Image (spheres, rainbow, N blue to C red):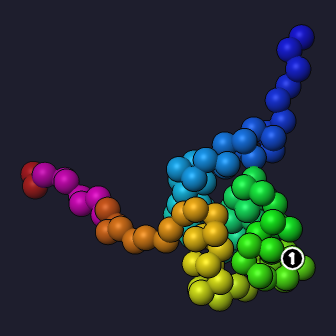
Amino acid sequence: MKAAVSYRKELMTLLKDPGEASAYLNAALEAGDKKAFLLALRNVLEAQGGMTAFARQTKINRVSLYKMLSDKGNPGFENILFLLHAAGVTFQTAPRVVKKNLRKAA
């Protein structure tokens, strides 16, 4: 029997790529759930070097990073942008695609 690959290990490997990390973060944003986005950002940071490395790079205390990105965390927008930049991704907006009702008049 083939050994199972850990989901987390595979996720961490994928998130090392900035393109994959960006798509992952965008999916979390689209979910519209702050907790999901913070978890996604935490996963990206862990995959790309870990909290200790990002704490050194950003000069944000490691414990503060964990608190900021916890379920109850409430990081400011500036901190989010700073962390995204440090992870090699950027925050952008795009127009929301609204599907029009294409029902034909009978």
**Residue 7 in the image, given as x and y percentages of width and height:** 79, 39
What residue sits right under mark 1 in the picture?
62
Label 1 crowd (10 A; few <14 / some 14-19 / many >=20): some
Q: Residue visible at 85% across and 25% down?
A: 4
The quadrant of the picture occupied by the N terminus is top right
Work out whether 19 lies above or below 71: above
Give left or right: position of 99 versus 71.
Answer: left
Give left or right: position of 79 versus 32.
Answer: right
Work out whether 36 lies above or below 19: below
Q: Residue visible at 78% across and 57% down?
A: 49
Q: Is residue 16 visible?
A: yes
Q: Is residue 101 magenta?
A: yes
Instruction: Residue 48: name its quadrant.
Output: bottom right
Q: Main secondary structure of the magenta part?
A: loop
**Residue 24 in the image, given as x and y percentages of width and height:** 59, 54
Residue extent of the magenta highlight = 98-104
Q: Residue visible at 65% across and 88% down?
A: 76
**Residue 92 in the image, given as x and y percentages of width and height:** 43, 70
Identify the element where label 1 is drawn. Answer: helix
Instruction: Residue 89: name its quadrant.
Output: bottom right
